[in-house]
Amino acid sequence: MDIFSEPQFHDDDAARAVLEDILWPDGPVCPHCGTVDRAYRTKRVGVYRCASKGCRKDFSVTKGTIMERSHISLHKWLQAFHLMASSKKGVSAHQLHRTLDIGYEAAWFMAHRIREAMRLDGFAPMGGGGGIVEADETYYGKRENKRPSPARRGRPYIKSGRAADKMPIISLVERGGRVRTFHVAVADKKTVKDIVTENVARETRLHTDESKLYFDAHEWIDSHETIKHSRGEYVRGDIHTNSAEGYFSIFKRGMKGIYQHCREKHLHRYLAEYDFRYNHRIRLGFNDRDRTTEAIRGSSGKRLTYHQPHGAGV
């Protein structure tokens, strides 16, 4: 059966009921005072009023989410969530514009809002207990603001080659588990060390290639094992960075084939999107419906406005 034949994808009342089930599993939650299941319906469709003394404020299921104050129909929001969660390499704003029959600008901003919902919030250290984490870096697109490391006295980190003017990306992939990806100003030793020490448990086995960025990794991680690509070596026992390279392959194919162009100030949002789908892939027990549900849950407590800064932590 075509999933879009389900009522929540073409009827706002059904869509609202689905959102309430996902975001309010224990009953309506007042976004003003935090009271759970102490609200009653008003005469306005989908609007509740908090019954707590001192509050008495009205709210709906979209209050305090990325959908707040949106004029786009709720059933179209659910379609967009499903399309972005189920498409392995992404869905362009033009495709959303055509499929949902909304303006291109609305579709573009809607997609960025959903990427904000997909952004990871809070996390435990990766690896630990002898677990394996692969660390690798890649370069994508064209850098708009060239920021070479001060230690190189104005020289770019990469002296020549196609990667010299591209945006650096560092990825940590837990073997058989999840990924965390970072767009950084410059890929140098300090940046790599900070990312690894803040995200990876010290007792982890860290796998990298022979990059000089990880030359002294043994000082801040218990076990550092390398694979030497320059010698044609890609696997030695269980030592490799194939998981990280596989992730980069999906990311780059999607960015080149679907999105085609990405401004540097938005790159962190696209990385959040690809991280989300990788972290909720079939191998980890998630199907398309599960991914859609998790993305909707992630929309709570987040806002993204046209006037909001584009910083990496937004």
Image: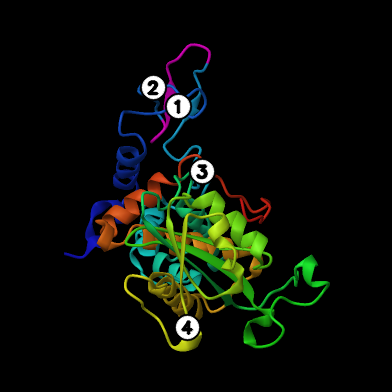
Expressed as whole percent of the image width and height from the top left, the position of residue 26 reads: 31, 29
Dot label at residue 39: 2
- Closer to the chain start, of discs 4 and 1, is 1
Q: Amino acid at mark 2?
A: Ala
Cα–Cα gap, marks 1 and 2: 8 Å
Cα–Cα gap, marks 4 and 1: 55 Å
At horizontal 44% and vertical 34% (from top left) the residue drawn is: 60
Tell me the quarter of the picture where residue 288 sits. Answer: bottom left
Crowd around label 4: few <14 · some 14–19 · many ≥20 (10 Å):
few
> Is residue 8 shown left or right of residue 309?
left
- Closer to the chain start, of discs 3 and 4, is 3
Q: Amino acid at mark 4?
A: His
Residue closest to the eye, 217 or 89: 217
Secondary element at image label 1: loop
Q: Amino acid at mark 3?
A: Glu
Q: Nearer the viewer, mark 3 or mark 4?
A: 4
Dot label at residue 68: 3
The residue beneath circle 4 is 229
Expressed as whole percent of the image width and height from the top left, the position of residue 229 reads: 47, 83
Cα–Cα gap, marks 1 and 3: 14 Å
Crowd around label 1: few <14 · some 14–19 · many ≥20 (10 Å):
many
Which range of residues does the magenta coloring cover? 44-54
